[in-house]
Image: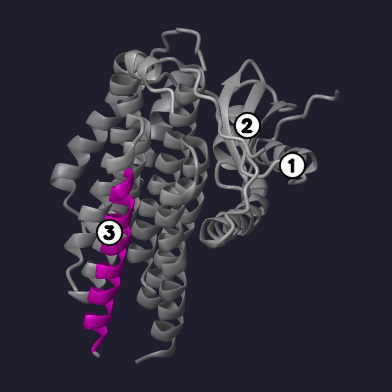
């Protein structure tokens, strides 16, 4: 196994952990829970991009990772501010589980 | 392969269980609050170890600073998001799960 | 976190200092992003714009870390957050899922301001604690395991944060 294959395989493993967490999107139960998977995708996505950048020797991918990290922060705050606070009063009532 | 690349590789490998645990915790933990614990702590340490490994492999100050910036951003984002999500949930009156 | 609305002109002494700090910070950020590779034709306008924009969005606040405090805080934080990651990973992967969550309340000894917010953010990464609400010095914390010795632990973190910011803890 060459080193770039190793980094590739590792990135694939991280992608798999993201895929597992997507089950949480299906199950919910609240949109807050679903948001967690998106949040996890942010962190693991940064990891995947760093590994690919290393394995393929493409430093530009590290810049993409940086943008990912920034977007993850903005997305989370925007979600809480806009989506969850305004839209979920009804969800909170109907969802007793 | 130089020694520092091997040492870096060890740190990169050490990150794997944390990423796995983050996802498993997200599935297995009983409520939003517990899942937030798994997400913030496990994944940030996973990424931290990965980034530390890459730093050791690269040994360049420019790479070091950029990787550090990425980690700090993710840390700040993860921690702030966890607080905000937990606060909204609490203020919406969602009761934390308790073992009885 | 509510800040008093105060206009600070960049031509006053304090405002100029704040603006300079940000100018330097954004320049360093640009240098890191380009990995020292230059591109200052785009960088200089971007840095100047970012400085004005950030001053418009957020007036300078007194936020100072003590260099020695930073040096003491970093290893402590790294070690504790590693412990936090290991702890939660162990619980998540354990077949019996050993958790016993509870909500606890903690009255902060830190003075109001940035140090309180920093503390709330810090404990999210430490073993078993998640700050869920911060209101007038009272912190609501979600504990992953109610059995953990958290009171002493939180006090110790507060001492570290106070050391970092160079502030005094209130006496109870």
The kind of secondary structure the magenta stretch mainly shows is helix
Vertically, is C118 above or below C29? above
Residue toward you, B78 or A14: A14
Q: Is residue A8 magenta?
A: yes
Task: Give coordinates of residue C116: x percent, y percent.
Answer: 62, 28
Q: Disc 3 marks which residue? A: C36
- Res A73 quadrant in image: top left
Do the residues indicated by labels 3 and 2 lie within the same chain of the protein?
yes
10 Å neighbourhood of mark 2: few (<14), some, or many (≥20)? many
Q: Position of residue B95 (x, y in %)?
A: 54, 25
Q: Nearer the viewer, mark 3 or mark 2?
A: 2
Query: Residues under labels 2 and 1: Cα distance?
Result: 10 Å
10 Å crowding of disc 3: few (<14), some (14-19), many (20+): some
Relative to C1, is C29 above or below? below
Q: Residues within 10 Å of mark 1 (few under 14, many from 20)?
A: some
The quadrant of the rendering that contains the C terminus of chain A is top left
Reading the image, the residue beneath label 2 is: C141
């Amino acid at each position: 196994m060459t080193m770039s294959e190793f980094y590739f395989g590792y990135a694939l493993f991280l992608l798999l952990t993201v895929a597992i967490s997507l089950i949480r999107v299906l199950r919910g139960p609240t949109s807050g829970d679903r948001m967690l998977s998106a949040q996890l995708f942010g962190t693991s996505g940064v990891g995947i991009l760093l590994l690919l950048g290393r394995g393929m020797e493409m430093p530009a991918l590290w810049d993409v990772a940086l943008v990912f990290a920034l977007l993850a922060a903005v997305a989370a705050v925007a979600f809480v501010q806009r989506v969850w606070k305004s839209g979920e009063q009804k969800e909170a009532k109907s969802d007793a589980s | 392969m130089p020694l520092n690349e091997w040492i870096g590789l060890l740190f990169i490998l050490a990150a794997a269980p944390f990423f796995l645990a983050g996802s498993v915790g997200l599935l297995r933990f009983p409520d939003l609050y517990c899942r937030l614990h798994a997400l913030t702590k496990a994944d940030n340490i996973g990424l931290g170890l990965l980034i530390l490994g890459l730093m050791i492999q690269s040994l360049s100050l420019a790479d070091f600073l950029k990787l550090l910036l990425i980690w700090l951003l993710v840390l700040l984002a993860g921690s702030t998001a966890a607080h905000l999500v937990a606060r909204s949930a609490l203020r919406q009156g969602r009761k934390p799960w308790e073992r009885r | 976190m509510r800040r008093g609305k105060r206009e600070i002109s960049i031509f006053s002494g304090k405002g100029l200092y704040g603006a300079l700090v940000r100018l330097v910070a954004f320049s360093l950020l640009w240098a890191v992003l380009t990995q020292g590779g230059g591109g200052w034709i785009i960088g200089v306008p971007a840095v100047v714009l970012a400085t004005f924009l950030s001053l418009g969005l957020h007036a300078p606040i007194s936020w100072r870390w003590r260099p020695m405090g930073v040096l003491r805080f970093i290893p402590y934080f790294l070690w504790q957050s590693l412990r936090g990651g290991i702890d939660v990973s162990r619980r998540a992967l354990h077949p019996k899922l050993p958790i016993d969550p509870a909500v606890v309340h903690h009255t902060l000894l830190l003075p109001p301001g940035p140090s309180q917010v920093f503390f709330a953010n810090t404990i999210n990464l430490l073993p078993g604690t998640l700050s869920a609400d911060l209101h007038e010095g009272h912190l609501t914390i979600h504990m992953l395991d109610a059995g953990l010795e958290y009171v002493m632990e939180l006090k110790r973190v507060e001492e570290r944060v106070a050391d970092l910011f160079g502030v005094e803890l209130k006496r109870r």
